[in-house]
Image (tube, rainbow, N blue to C red):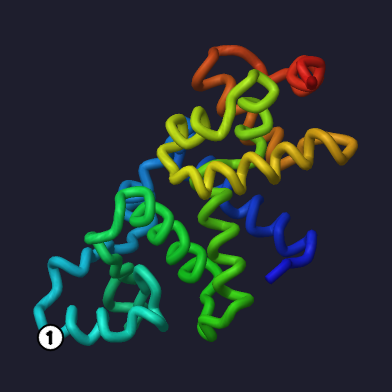
Amino acid sequence: MILTKEEYSLLDQTALQLRIDYNFLNDEINVFKLAKLMNVSLIPYSQINVHSKDFILKRQDKIGDGFFIIENEKYAPRIFYNDEKPYFRIRFTICHEIEHFIFDDKVNDEYEESKANHFARQLLIPSCLVIMYILKGSDIYDLSYKFNVSLEVACIAYAHAKKRINYTEHKLDDYETEFMNLYYEKNYGIEFDDYKLLSNKK
């Protein structure tokens, strides 16, 4: 399902703001630490009792690779995830469920799933960083390694960033520039220069 430009922008901004708020200014984000800092408990399927695990696995078509629960104010929100899945998939699932938690999704329909998938990709591999790496010559395999994401996620992120570079009057949004300023200061010890970055455009 295709979202509106405003919806994509809100998801992108929220994902980058999380990275800023919790000081995740490296390429690869530690999603386990992020959840902990957000006071969200992560529970792998292997740690729940046999009856509950059997109940969950029989409903995989509805809950996918994970789900989140908010019971009441006395208990921290919990994200359950299938730890038998590949590590790439686990990281994506946790980010996906974080979106459901942040936006208080209830319906679990195609629209909410599309939002959560886009948010997860943006949190794992932000478009503004992908643009930077593409302009520096990185390919899909480089992106997959740098951000520790699957080739599928890297491919989608690459295509989106390449479209921004080739088919739009490229200009980072203010929230992207804010993130890039912090990212450059932490990782390179220099100020982010949007003009210099774009001068490398091929």
Residue under the image location 37 percent in, 73 percent down = 68
* Left or right relative to 50: residue 175: right
Residue under the image location 30 percent in, 53 percent down = 86
Can residue 109 be seen here? The reply is yes
Vertical side of 172 occupied by 42: above or below: below
Vertical side of 65 occupied by 25: above or below: above
* Left or right relative to 149: residue 125: right
Outermost residue on the right side: it is: 169
Under mark 1, the amino acid is His
Q: Give the secondary structure at mark 1.
A: helix
Q: Foreground: 125 or 104? A: 125
Outermost residue on the left side: it is: 50
- The spot of residue 195 in percent (x, y) is 81, 19
Residue 182 figure quarter: top right
Residue under the image location 68 percent in, 71 percent down = 1
Question: Circle 1: is it few (<14), some (14-19), or many (20+) Cα within 10 Å?
Answer: few
Vertical side of 170 occupied by 191: above or below: above
Quarter of the picture containing the C terminus is: top right
Residue that label 1 marks: 51
Residue under the image location 71 percent in, 58 percent down = 8
- The spot of residue 65 in percent (x, y) is 36, 68
